[in-house]
Amino acid sequence: MLILYASELCNFQERDVSVVLRRLALQPREEYRSGFPELGAIVQAVRRERGQREAHERRAREKAEEHEARCSRVLDPERWFTAEMIADGIVERLKAQYGKDGFDWTKPYSPKPYEPEAE
């Protein structure tokens, strides 16, 4: 039985499988239920966990790209704005706006690591 489980679960990343198995292991077992959950339930839970992790990583990548774009606009304005826009003070207005939002354009972006949801 364990070989069947291992052969199916080896197609997923270890961290996704371990999160799901830890979560399933901590659930109280109902009376007259097998000690092993159905393989389909485990595979479905691992796929859901993988989807959540990938969505988190995708959002973190998008935030990092946005941060990089903001920084490059402020730190290298000639590349993004015309001389007239720079003379009009658009860069200073961007610095003021980003400062109000709590945006620090002098520091690199570092996303929070993915934390699985507790059930």
Image: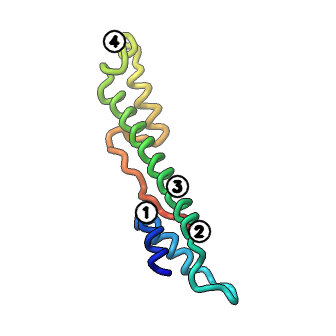
Q: Position of residue 35 (x, y in %)?
A: 58, 86
Q: Residues within 10 Å of mark 4 (few under 14, many from 20)?
A: few
Can you tell which mark lies on residue 40?
2
Q: Amino acid at mark 1?
A: Asn
Instruction: Report if the CB atoms under discs 4 and 1 are less than 8 Å apart.
Output: no
Q: Quadrant of the C terminus?
A: bottom right
Can you tell which mark lies on residue 83?
4
Q: Which residue is mark 1?
A: 11
Give the answer, above or below, for where 33 lies relative to 82: below
Q: Position of residue 110 (x, y in %)?
A: 37, 50
Give the answer, above or below, for where 87 lies relative to 5: above
Q: Earlier in the sequence, mark 2 or mark 1?
A: 1
Residue sitting at x 38%, y 32%: 69
Q: Amino acid at mark 2?
A: Gly
Can you tell which mark lies on residue 51?
3
Q: Amino acid at mark 3?
A: Gly
- Left or right: 108 with respect to 22? left
Q: Position of residue 40 (x, y in %)?
A: 59, 68
Circle nearer the viewer, 4 or 1: 1
Mark 4 to mark 2 CA distance (whole Å)? 62 Å
Mark 4 to mark 1 CA distance (whole Å)? 55 Å
Residue sitting at x 37%, y 46%: 109
Instruction: Report if the CB atoms under discs 3 and 1 are less than 8 Å apart.
Output: no
